[in-house]
């Protein structure tokens, strides 16, 4: 057995620089073999099947080959739908004869990164327990077979996802309405414009020409400001910004104003509560959500319950308590009736359906954001932040300065070697200053 780094799943599967651990062939063959063993062990007779998709990165082809080689060693067959969004793959996995789905994507990361997201037969992300078992198996296995990877083309399956959206929005008519869509040169580049045209929209495409290396490059949900002038120039009723794998949606109204996940949850939270469609009068969010979300929904009699960062935590809370709506500020919006799958395109269609021809700017006016500053500090290590005296001292100073009129969130990224520093306050200058001061201390103590 050769020496490789221990395999450990992060907050959203495996992710890293393509060609480097864990995103290199030997590690990926081990992951494929481990998943195959897990599927064979948990299944009941018959051929095990895994469905793949990817977001168009150049490294996706050899990553697919490596994973399939591992699966073949465990006698598991594979099919691929090609370039697709993560939510489409999740829903296709759940609706077909598949035991698991694997999305090859690094989501919002640059093109030189890639990742692996694994879904169960129900289209949901693997549980933490299953991921720990995969880690254990992958660190023990050493598949030797390097036979040619055999993958069945299943690209036509994508039409089933489009048909599902057609059924869920059977009365949506976008004829005569112009919609701009920015797919980040990623997984939604073909699907998103085609679906919008299916509903009759006049579509303006931005970031819909993936070449393997331009994903998220100045476009998509990370850069919605790039779509704002396009929306105004074309007189569109709305702009939809997806991230690289399409599970996030950030939206631009007809005036060019940008609306994130908190604004979306405010809009639907108030609307669904008024219609009696919000069990318990609760919306599930994360600690990253802006205080403006809490204030706006409190005005409508809706409670916001916060979870740790990561849509899987929101999904778990929604499933446990039967909440109908949840999400993240970053653009993951989760609806119980959409199988708890974050889907930027679905969310955009649902907004268009709810607006029914009205102005988005007016409908979203209830949400007023507290000034927020977020600084990502590259770190060389991730010790417990409470074990670093200078950081603890500065954190206390910042919290005292906020005096209950804002908040501080300090945490490490689950997917990158970074520490995230977020401060909210009613006064922007105070917000920016306090955030920068704390970031400077972290950079001094832990900076890469």
Image: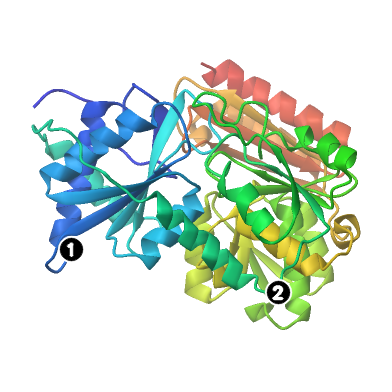
Q: Which residue is mark 1?
A: 42
* Position in image of residue 436 (x %, y %): 73, 25
Q: Residue at x 44, y 24 (%)?
A: 381
Query: How many other residues sit within 10 Å of disc 2, few (<14), some (14-19) or many (≥20)?
Result: few
Q: Which residue is mark 2?
A: 171
Snapshot quadrant of residue 376: top right
Viewer-side label of 2, 1: 2
Rendered image quadrant of residue 358: bottom right
Residue 384, placed above or below residue 347: above
Picture residue at 82% right of the left edge, 68% below the top: 356
Q: Nearer the viewer, residue 361 or 284?
A: 361
SS category of the residue bearing label 2: loop
Query: 105 or 428, which is in the foreground?
Result: 105
Relative to 65, say whether 336 is above or below: below
**Taking 283 as reference, is 321 left or right?**
left
Question: Which image quadrant: the N terminus?
Answer: top left
Q: Mark 1: which secondary structure?
A: helix
Task: Name the image colouring.
Answer: rainbow
Residue 328 left/right relative to 82: right
């Amino acid at each position: 057995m050769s020496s490789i780094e221990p395999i450990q799943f992060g907050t959203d599967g495996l992710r890293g620089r393509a060609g480097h651990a864990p995103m290199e062939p030997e590690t990926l063959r081990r992951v494929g073999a481990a998943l195959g063993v897990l599927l064979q062990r948990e299944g009941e007779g018959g051929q095990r099947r895994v469905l793949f998709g990817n977001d168009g990165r150049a490294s996706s082809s050899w990553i697919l080959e490596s994973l399939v080689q591992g699966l073949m060693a465990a006698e598991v067959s594979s099919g691929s739908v090609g370039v697709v969004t993560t939510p489409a793959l999740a829903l296709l996995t759940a609706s077909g004869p598949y035991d698991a789905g694997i999305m090859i994507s690094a989501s919002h990361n640059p093109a030189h990164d890639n990742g692996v997201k694994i879904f169960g037969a129900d289209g949901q992300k693997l549980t933490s327990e299953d991921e720990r078992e995969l880690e254990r198996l992958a660190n023990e296995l050493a598949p030797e077979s390097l036979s040619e990877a055999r993958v069945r083309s299943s690209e036509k399956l994508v039409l089933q996802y489009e048909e599902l959206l057609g059924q869920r929005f059977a009365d949506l008519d976008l004829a005569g309405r112009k919609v701009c869509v920015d797919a980040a040169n990623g997984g939604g580049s073909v699907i998103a414009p085609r679906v919008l045209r299916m509903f009759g929209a006049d579509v303006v495409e931005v970031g819909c020409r993936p070449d393997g290396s331009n994903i998220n490059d100045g476009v998509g949900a990370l850069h919605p400001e790039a779509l704002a002038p396009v929306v105004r120039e074309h007189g569109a009723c709305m702009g939809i910004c997806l991230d690289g794998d399409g599970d996030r949606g950030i939206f631009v109204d007809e005036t060019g104003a940008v609306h994130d996940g908190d604004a979306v949850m405010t809009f639907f939270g108030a609307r669904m509560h008024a219609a009696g469609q919000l069990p318990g009068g609760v919306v599930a969010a994360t600690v990253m959500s802006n205080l403006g979300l809490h204030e706006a929904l409190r005005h409508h009699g809706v409670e916001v319950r916060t979870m740790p960062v990561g849509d899987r935590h929101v999904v778990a809370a929604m499933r446990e308590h039967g909440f109908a709506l949840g999400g993240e500020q970053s653009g993951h919006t989760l609806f119980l009736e959409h199988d708890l799958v974050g889907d930027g395109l679905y969310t955009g269609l649902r907004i268009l359906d709810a607006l029914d021809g009205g102005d988005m700017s007016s409908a979203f006016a209830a949400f007023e954001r507290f000034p927020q500053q977020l600084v990502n500090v590259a770190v060389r290590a991730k010790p417990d932040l409470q074990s670093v005296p200078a950081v603890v001292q500065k954190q206390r100073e910042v919290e005292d300065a906020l005096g209950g009129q804002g908040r501080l969130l300090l945490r490490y990224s689950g997917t990158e070697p970074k520490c995230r520093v977020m401060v909210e306050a009613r006064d922007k200058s105070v917000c920016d200053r306090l955030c920068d001061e704390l970031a400077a201390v972290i950079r001094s103590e832990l900076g890469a």
